[in-house]
Image: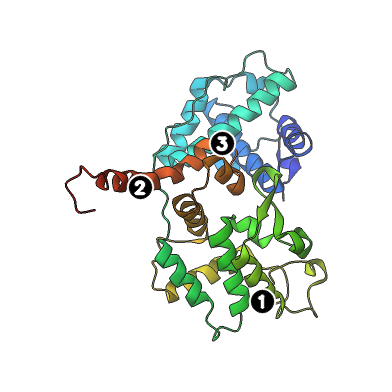
Amino acid sequence: MIDNKENPEFLNSFLQYSTVILNKSKNSVKEYNYDLSNFFKFMSNYLGITSEEDIKNVDIHLLDIEFLKKIDLEAIHAYLYYLKDAHNSKAATLARKASTIRIFFAYISNKEKLLEVNPAQNLENPKLDKRQPKYLTLEESQKLLKIAEDEDNRNSERDFAIITLFLNCGMRLSELVSISLNDIQFDECKMTVIGKGNKERTIYLNKACMEAINKYLAVRPTQGIKITDTKALFLSERLERISKRTVQYIVEKELRKAGLDTTKYSTHKLRHTAATLMYQYGNVDIRALQELLGHESIATTEIYTHVANNQVRDAVSRNPLSGEDN
């Protein structure tokens, strides 16, 4: 919950713009508020407006446009350095915060026309480390599904359906817990989900997904469900919409039962697994994969093309001139 009384007027104006015009989700707006309020608190100290040692205690609600006019690119760089030095923030975190600062100043400068010079206009993102996504092999994925189908688990149908959707559809954790019964079009074997940026997309369900969902629905409770969650697909034992933490616990439990490293794999790694297996075995076009995963940029999807390296190596080794037995 955002306490608007703690914010300066220009920040609340930006948050309203983000909600109404940019149609950002509640979580995104909450992140904007957190990132920018911390930024302004640091700037109050950096610019000598306050001498409060603990930045968390800095009062920013009376800050005005004159304050914003004092901020330049060097000051923004000082803030990012502070995050790196004092909080050991990773490059991805710094990039997200830099993006938020750019969006805010673009709004103040271009939309509201309150600044003649945009101090963040030339702000660059920190260079990100290029890391290959961790994912389960096909054999490990099959083993996990087999373990999750274990009938000794009283929630086996539900847990198996959850694992199946993760591994087949590549959806995000937030998308899975938000699925409602009326999101699923059973006759057309597809569902709609709300992804990042409050964007709706269609996910097509294969035979394995449909069978797992229908098997779960056959045992899903119909009585005593919390009134606000009667349409939720996945229910907790308290008969309410399942939480993200519960799903994370389920995945950790099943990974452990399958003998897989829970420090290496998670719900998000199952999303990576689905994407990698589709690209590796399904001959899926990268643009189609981008649409399925709900990536805004094709560059994000391209991390899954790492599997092509093995395919290229195999192709070279199979050349009849390779000197190898083919």
Using the rendered view, name the quadrant where residue 106 is placed: top right
**Total number of numbered discs in the rendering:** 3
Residue drawn 57% across the image and 22% down it = 120
Residue, disc 1: 215
User: Horizontal and vertical percent for residue 290?
Assistant: 57, 43
Residue drawn 67% across the image and 13% down it = 116
Ranked by sequence position, the earlier of labels 3 and 2 is: 3
Q: Is 219 or 260 nearer to us in this picture? A: 219
Front of the two marks 1 and 2: 2
Is residue 326 found left or right of 275 in the rendered image? left
Task: Tell me if residue 221 can be seen.
Answer: yes
Front of the two marks 1 and 3: 1
Ranked by sequence position, the earlier of labels 1 and 2 is: 1
Q: Which mark is residue 22?
A: none
What whole-number distance in Å separates the C-alpha atoms at marks 3 and 2?
A: 24 Å
What whole-number distance in Å separates the C-alpha atoms at marks 1 and 3?
A: 36 Å
Secondary structure of the residue carrying numbered label 2: helix
Q: Which mark is residue 311?
A: 2
What amino acid is found at the position of numbered circle 2 in the picture? Gln
Secondary structure of the residue carrying numbered label 1: helix
Secondary structure of the residue carrying numbered label 3: loop
What whole-number distance in Å separates the C-alpha atoms at marks 1 and 2?
A: 37 Å
What amino acid is found at the position of numbered circle 1 in the picture? Lys
